[in-house]
Structure formats: C-alpha cells, structure tokens
Image (cartoon, rainbow, N blue to C red):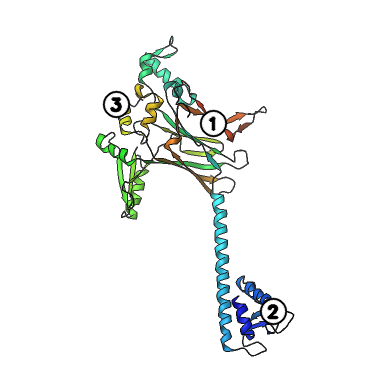
Amino acid sequence: LIYYGISLHYPMCVNSNGGMIGVDEETSIFGDCFHLSWTTFSTVGYGLIFPATGASDFFVPTGCVGVGILGSFQAFMGVVYADFCATILFGKVLRTQNNAQVFFSDPIVVRFGKKELYDSSSDGSNDHNKVQEAKGEYDEELGGLCSNQIEKDIPCPSLEFRLVNCLHGVPSGEIVNAKLDCVAILDPKLSKWNKTLQINDNDTQSVVDEKTTISELAKVLRDTNSKTPNRTIAFHSADSKQPHMFTKLALDANEHPYFRRVWFGRHRLDENSPLLTPVARNRVKLNDGFWPAEMNNYESIKNSIHFRHILVCIQGTSKASATSVYAQKVYDLVDVTVGYRFVPMNYRTDDGDLKTDSHLLNAVYQQRGGGAEPFQ
C-alpha cells in the first residue's frame, strides 16, 4: 500500500519496464506495486519493476531516494522473517527427534506383604527361605516360615511404575544407555519434622534461594548426587511463603543399556525413603529395617506415604537417529494404588516370538496375599 500511494503521487519514483509506472494504460498500478513489494520482501530479485534511480531513462527527483531506503528496509525484514521461520521449523523438528517414544504408566502401585514380595522369583524367595531354615525358623508342616517370623521379618513395600518403548516392534527402535532420574517434591511441613525426630544421622538438607551463587548451587547438586542416602534441597522463592523441598529417589535399577520393551522403576519404602513420613521411617528403623506388622495393611501404608509430586525423566540415545532423546512424567499422590501389581505386557505368540501389548500399560490386578485397597 505504501508503494501504491507513492506511485499514485510520484510515478517517476518507480521504474516499470523502462518507464514510469502507470504510463502504460494496459497495466495495473496496484498489480505492479504488489509485484515490487513481494519481490523485495522475498529477496527474489527485481525484474521489470524496481525503484527508479539516476540510471533510469527519465528524470528522477531527489526525493525518490526514500523509495530505495524503503525497499532496503523491506528486504532486511524479509531476511529476518525467513531466518525466524527456519529457526522455528528447525526447533520443532529437533524437538520431535529428541522426544523419546516412551509411555509411562498412569498409576503407581505399591506392593507389600511377605507373600507378595518373597514369593516373586525375582526377589530371591528361595535364598531367603534357606537362610531362615538355617536359623531353624522354617517350618515344613506350615509350608513356609514360622508364624512368629512371618509377623516379624516383613519386607518393606515396593513403590513401582513402569514405562514401555512404543518402538518395540520397529527395527532400531531401542534406546541405548537409558537412564531414569526420579525426583520427589515433598511437603515442607512434614520435611521439617526430620530435624525434630532426628530419624537418620545421614539426612541432610541444603537451602537454595535466589541469592545463591552458581558455585554454591553446583556444590549442592554435586552433594545431592553423592552417596548420601537422603539428600534434600530446599528452594526458597520470593513469591512463596514455604520452601520447595526437592529430593532424589533411589531406584533399584535406574540404568538400562538396551531399553527395548518394558522397564520397571522400583523404589523401596524403607527407613531411608524420603517418601515415608518421619514417624513411619522411625518405626521401620526401630524394627531393624523391616516393615512393622501392625502397619502391614493398605490403610497404614497409604497414610505413611507423603509427597506432592514425583518427577520421572528418562534420557538416552536413540539407536535409529543416534540423537539424545528424553521423556518425562509427573505423578501425584492420588496416582498411588496400594496392594496391586501390573499385568504382564510381554507374551509369546504361537510361533514363539516375543511380543508386547502396549494396551496393558495401565492394567493392574490384586497382589498375592490380598489386602489391596478397594477401587473407587
């Protein structure tokens, strides 16, 4: 429109096919101005229509230099616009490639009880029974452990979630050197009780606020990744009355060299678990690291767990694209289901091939020994 207004009042400022614009009655001034505008903005290059200069075959006033300045500015804006579009498109493509094709389960299950945890072949029940038999605490007539030992040596509950690789059936769909990082955001009111009860001498708390320097923050992060069992970072922000309490959760297996199908993230709710209330942790410690018998029910376990959010992040290298990929999931306390276990997702076909049913990712059933909380 600016070119059109200039062409109507100063036609000698625009060169159209060797003459002033609008001289040829068969041509449209608006069409010529539109052609001049898009060729300038797209930096394609001028054709038969361009700003008039002193090299034109007709008189060009000095004031027409403004048309050249306008064209230069429009060409510059065209280059900037093209760069922005290319950057956004490249960022979208790169983000898509860096997104791991992984789905997390919606629920978190908590398995508890000796029959559930010790009867699982992966938990080494045979080894445990041999130890108890050597102590004279294994009763063959009862088909297992003596009654007093059953009530005493109860293993701590296991909090579990799982994730599935959506590319399990695609060649080169594996994630190499995969790693799970799990961080819990705790309730600051309950976290403050740790100092009062003095549950564990190894419990430490680091305070980080907006005045913390980069070197101090780096030291806190290094200490958090050290061998300290329970390390908490308290971040104080100016717009919040209570600090945000962050702590890293220890998983039984947080690394997978070749993640192809299904991966379980398991956290043991023992005396070092920051997810338990200070009272529950203290009772586990007084019970020699075993779960108290009077708390071996879903109501007590549900009341013993406290957190605001659990952030789970997986990162690794895609075998197909050789790029770093990641995915994350945020769990809330309402996602915890006590007394259930996940339905197996892997199965064998008639031909003997191993397959994975991704539709069973969130499917659960009651654990061995019963005692699960009712579904609402």
Pick whichever of labels 1 and 2 is earlier in the sequence: 2
Q: Nearer the viewer, residue 65 or 174?
A: 65
**Disc 2 target residue:** 48
Considering the numbered disc 2 on the image, is that residue within a helix, a strand or a loop? loop
Front label number (3 vs 2): 2
Name the residue rendered at 56%, 50% in the picture. 97
Query: Position of 174 compared to 213: left or right?
Result: right
User: Which numbered disc covers residue 363?
Assistant: 1
Name the residue rendered at 59%, 42% in the picture. 173
Quarter of the view holding residue 225? top left
Which amino acid, mark 3?
Leu
Considering the numbered disc 3 on the image, is that residue within a helix, a strand or a loop? helix
Q: CA distance from mark 3 to mark 2?
A: 91 Å
Q: CA distance from mark 3 to mark 1?
A: 36 Å
Q: Is residue 2 depicted above or below 64 in this figure?
A: above
**Disc 3 target residue:** 286
Name the residue rendered at 56%, 66% in the picture. 81
